[in-house]
Image (spheres, rainbow, N blue to C red):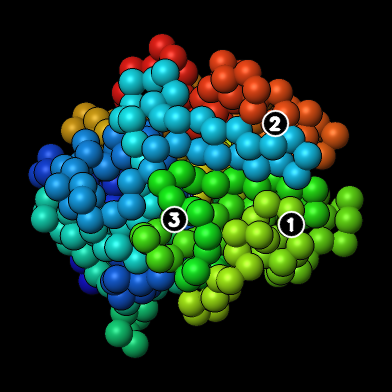
Amino acid sequence: MDGEYDVVIVGAGPGGSAVACELAPRGFRVLLLDKEYFPREKTCGDGVAPRAVHALYRLGLRGELEGRFQRTSGIRFYATRGGLTEVRYPMGSRYPDHGYVVPRRELDFMLLRRARELGAEVWEGCRATEVLPQRNGRFPGVRAEREGRRVEIAARYIVGADGPTSLVGGKLGMLNRDPLFLGVSVRCYMRGAEGVRDFLEIYPEDAISPACGWIFPVDGETVNVGAGFMLYARTRRDLNVNRVFEDFVARTRHAASKLRHAEPLGRTRGALLRVGLGGSVPVKGNVLLVGDAASMTNPISGEGITYALESGRWAGETLAAALRSGDPGLAENYRRILEWHYRRYFRLGTMAIRYGNNPWFVNPLLFTTSRVTRLGDKMGRFLMNCRRSDHPL
Ligand SMILES: Cc1cc2nc3c(=O)[nH]c(=O)nc-3n(C[C@H](O)[C@H](O)[C@H](O)COP(=O)(O)OP(=O)(O)OC[C@H]3O[C@@H](n4cnc5c(N)ncnc54)[C@H](O)[C@@H]3O)c2cc1C
């Protein structure tokens, strides 16, 4: 073995770093590994919702965020025939009254540095290739490639935080391929958009239905532009995500007019989303999945940073209890915690998006919410999974 740890975490996105930030300061031996060298690109809309901001502040990152990145005051929805609905944070909840747009190149690097500061050992450029075969009822560690060398890492617990195509989850049969829980999106940075300031802008426009597009302000000049859809929607129409993106930029009523003079900065990049908690089994023996690997993206908004940070925290807390008590059975509590917090909302969201995501419903809905502020606020709270009575977690 090339190292022995209490916990090895595969993947240093927000989910993996959040687990490391919980465990390392409690004195556990934690290895956080990622196949990339940081800072690295990650395909994302970069929208950090107030719930995620709360989780980042809790990790001590307020000073790194404030004044450095674009703050957002709420969300604007543009429907082709429904007009504009504006919803302002904090949406009645007790989460912060603002969000941010933070390029993932920066956000993930910031989290990785924090995990390191708190005592986690970090191996960049290390790709996990296998979960070692089960012995005495537990998986003893992972095999990986590091700087051209094959290494074996022993650990009492393994966390798969390696995104929607998780190697850990895939090898152990913890992922399913149900298109109800899978989506695909592309994004491109652009310069020269008109009138996009401190709101996240979401465009469920007729020309790209059942896909949805977005324009998020990254700074005074740059925007993050993207579009995506759920995979089951493909059966309804011959959908291609790159064509959808082109239609979004050129042929929508509201977005295209804002983007008519915009120039792309770099190429359009795409990625899979695993949503709604139903696309994975989050615990198998001494292996836990977090974030996208655990299918933790919000099925309505496509927002996953919040859920990667929150599930990472709960995985860390659960593992700390299991390691302290020596009772491996406690790992199962993690599944219960996820279900307690998200199952109802994610189920409702999965159904709402499946049956409500069409112009016949969206246009009248947004027409109404654009005129009745109270309904607009309710819709915004539902989308962001914030209730009036919420206490920050
Ligand atoms: C186009 C698009 C737009 C999105 N927009 C938003 C948005 O605006 N706001 C929002 O909140 N969410 C958004 N999401 C969702 C969000 O990106 C994810 O939910 C979030 O990144 C999940 O974090 P994670 O830590 O679980 O996984 P990831 O961020 O995917 O991190 C996984 C890490 O694992 C590493 N890894 C993978 N395999 C291995 C391996 N075998 N060995 C070692 N390392 C490995 C990867 O290099 C990566 O660093 C978007 C997603 C997409 C696709």
At label 3, which amino acid type do we have? Pro
User: Residue extending furthest top?
Assistant: 389
Q: Classify mark 2: residues with Cα within 10 Å, few (<14), some (14-19) or many (20+).
A: many
Q: Quadrant of residue 329?
A: top left
Q: Which residue is mark 2?
A: 366
Q: Residue at x 89, y 50 (%)?
A: 236
Q: Residue at x 30, y 75 (%)?
A: 37
Q: Is residue 56 left or right of residue 46?
A: left
Q: Which residue is mark 3?
A: 217
At label 1, which amino acid type do we have? Thr
One can see residue 389 in this view: yes
**134 vs 85, nearest the viewer:** 85
Q: Which residue is mark 1?
A: 252
Q: Is residue 156 left or right of residue 341?
A: left
Q: Secondary structure at mark 2?
A: helix
Q: Secondary structure at mark 3?
A: strand
Instruction: Please tell me which of labels 1 and 2 falls first in the chain.
Output: 1
